[in-house]
Amino acid sequence: MRKLAAVAAGFAAAVFLSCRGLWVLALLLPLPALLKREDRWRRCALVCLGVAAGLTWTAGYNAHFLGSARELDGVPSTFTAAVTDWPYETSYGAGVEAKVTLEDGMVLRATIYGDSEKLMDLRPGDALTVTAEWSGPPQTATESWTWRLSQGIHLTGSVKALEVRRPETVPLWALPAHWSQAVKEAVAAAFPAESAGLVTALLTGDTSGLAQGDYNALRRAGLAHAVAVSGLHMSFLVQLAVAFTGSRYRRRTALVVLPLMVCYALAVGCTPSVVRAAVMNGLLLLGPLLGRENDSPTSLSLALLLLLLQDPWASQSVSLQLSFASVAGILAFSGRVRDYVTGFFPTPEKKENQKHGPLRRLGWWAAGSLGVTVGALAFTVPLLVWYFGSLSVISPVSNLLCLPLLQLTFQGGLLTALVQLLLPAVGTALGQVVGLLPRLVLWLVRNLAAAPFASVTTVGPYLMGGLATVYLLWLCYLGLKGPHRPLVPLCCSAIVLVTALVLNHAAYWAGSLTMTVLDVGQSQCVVLRCGDRVAVVDCGSTGEDAGDIAAGYLSTMGIKRVDLLVLTHCHNDHANGVATLMDRLEVSNLAVPQVIDPPELQTALLNVAEERNIPALMVWDDVTLAFGDAVLTLYGPLGSGDTNEEGLSLLCETADFSALITGDMDQVVEGRLVKYGNLPDIDVLLVGHHGSKYAASDLLLETVTPETAVVSCGYNTYGHPAPETLLRLSEAGCDIYRTDLQGNVTITVR
């Protein structure tokens, strides 16, 4: 019996539930330990010990660190701090992470926001005296604060005054951040621009230099994990080090690889997946030297225990959950999948097969890769669907084809960066050669991601039910002992998935008109379909790329062309995904407001449309367009002075249905729309400006009398949707739906 694994499992589960506010459920965790007869009471006792320790540790951590942070909430204070990472630009200035020392000596990690002029010149190791208005986590953690806490952030601060003292030498603890920056600069100098972004992402996890379209393609191909530094990259590093030291010399290998893993983990920020890999690989190397056998489940449990002892809120990190779930699946199932596949041909070690050695060794390697890929997916599929709302169907193929190339790219990129630091001329020449690898990887990824149904957006009950059925079927199959042919589950999976896609497709196309408000955060993106005509109104997002979300949704429904793309106005939250949408789908026409001083984004998008020969309709006066059996009316700009007020509004009408979309206009412009727009009674109102208190006025509601109101919103600091707006909608008799609560909202007209 693995005692450490039992304790760690109870500890981790209790920590996770406690951070979610469900600590009562942790009391039930020892019950599953009683299901297996062997050592049931000892196992139950160990799980109880882990649960008790997890609940106690989390409560103590919250009281000590989060309690101190909450005391500073809303209180302007001055503290000393030390910069821990490089600053970065934000929508409203810049941000930087720092360790803040309170008056009682307690150290909290904080994200400090301020003007770019004040923060962008900072570097890790700088000492600060900062006066800021601080914000701590609320008693009930919000989505944004759960994310911050999972990254180890206890405070945020808005800078009022800042004094910087730069030490003569970089402190030892800040050196890894400088190493990482040096590698980024070396890669940028050695590699061509089209290759440097992917190499930098592979080595450091910084995807800022990677084109948005390429990152989206990596996600659809199931390879996004390759540019989020994880245990995969640690294994690449270890294999490179072993190749230089020689696997036969275990002591020498351990002495070289262990410090190298520690330095790399520190340089990339000690992400949970990297720490997990460092602990497991470290134990694997130390085991023979200490005369102990390596036990992978115990190593995995120890890594999880160490991470959660350092910070219980790391249990809420998506990176940690995916990392440990993938390794658990690999340990449980990869060997079984590999053995089954290799059962069709003799192993290359047998002497009688040496004449076909290379071919059989290739088959053995492919079987091993397939086993690892299937194992990694075994427990991560539910997490991927839950967090990202999509599933890469082509990921087994893309991992099999691209992971060897990614390994060579990582190792070649690291060696090239080191050469560039020592011999710049040689490094630049080497970068031109090695740079062919990332270009090949991106070419493969783009083509794999463009395959039909390469990635499926998990929308609709039929598709969700089909995927859940297939997942449970294969989980049961992999859990069976002994050899079992996969023909039956393969055929069943194909039948279930095809049926789910057909039903999902039929349900979407069954109605005469469908209106879907996509969940894109504190932004807006609406898909209208009438007959075989498709229109998208706005395409912006505050989180993931709205263009990728919209294209994924439409592709899942079998739609490859957007007949009309309407932008009510060109702010980021309504238009920053347009370029991606144009990349992935054919867009036939574009409509934007004609204004005297167009924003930069509108000019840029018009240039993109011109390059793609997409006609652009500049709307100044009201325009009526045929849209299948429906009619679209685009109301020209009615306000002035601000992009929100200079935007379009749209009315979609059929004989039995009408919907109004007002963009971000305020109540004053709504009054002009009522006066000049000749608005009818409507069925659906897409509430303006994400539910701002200045939208959905009484005058508009009394005029159009909507039956249903939809608010497109997500986490924000503006208070959207405003309570007074929700009250007005309720008093007007509207049924209210919100994308931050219900996700995608679809209205179908039969």
Image (cartoon, helix red, strand yellow):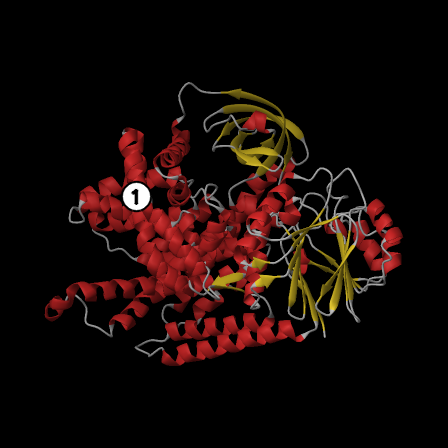
Residue 203 or residue 663, whichever sits in front = 663
Q: Quadrant of residue 603?
A: top right
The residue that appears at 42% across and 80% down in the rendered structure is 491
Q: Is 192 on the left-hand or right-hand side of 240?
A: right
The residue that appears at 29% across and 57% down in the rendered structure is 295
Q: Quadrant of the N terminus?
A: bottom left
State whether residue 698 appears in this view.
no
Element marked by disc 1: helix
Going by the picture, which residue comes out furthest to the bottom?
A: 488
The residue singled out by tag 1 in the image is 434
Q: Is 87 on the left-hand or right-hand side of 205?
A: right
The image shows residue 372, relative to residue 131, as above or below, that is below
Q: Is 6 on the left-hand or right-hand side of 26?
A: left
Q: Quadrant of the C terminus?
A: bottom right
Amino acid marked by disc 1: Val
The image shows residue 745, relative to residue 320, as above or below, that is below
State whether residue 55 appears in this view.
yes
Across and down, in percent, residue 5 comes to 38, 58
Residue 193 or residue 38, whichever sits in front = 193
Query: Looking at the image, how many numbered discs can be counted on the residues?
Result: 1
Across and down, in percent, residue 718 comes to 71, 43
The image shows residue 121, relative to residue 66, as above or below, that is above
The image shows residue 420, relative to residue 234, as above or below, that is above
Across and down, in percent, residue 54 comes to 49, 52
Across and down, in percent, residue 367 comes to 28, 66
The residue that appears at 39% across and 37% down in the rendered structure is 267
The residue that appears at 23% across and 63% down in the rendered structure is 362
Quick one: label 1, few (<14), some, or many (20+) residues within 10 Å? many
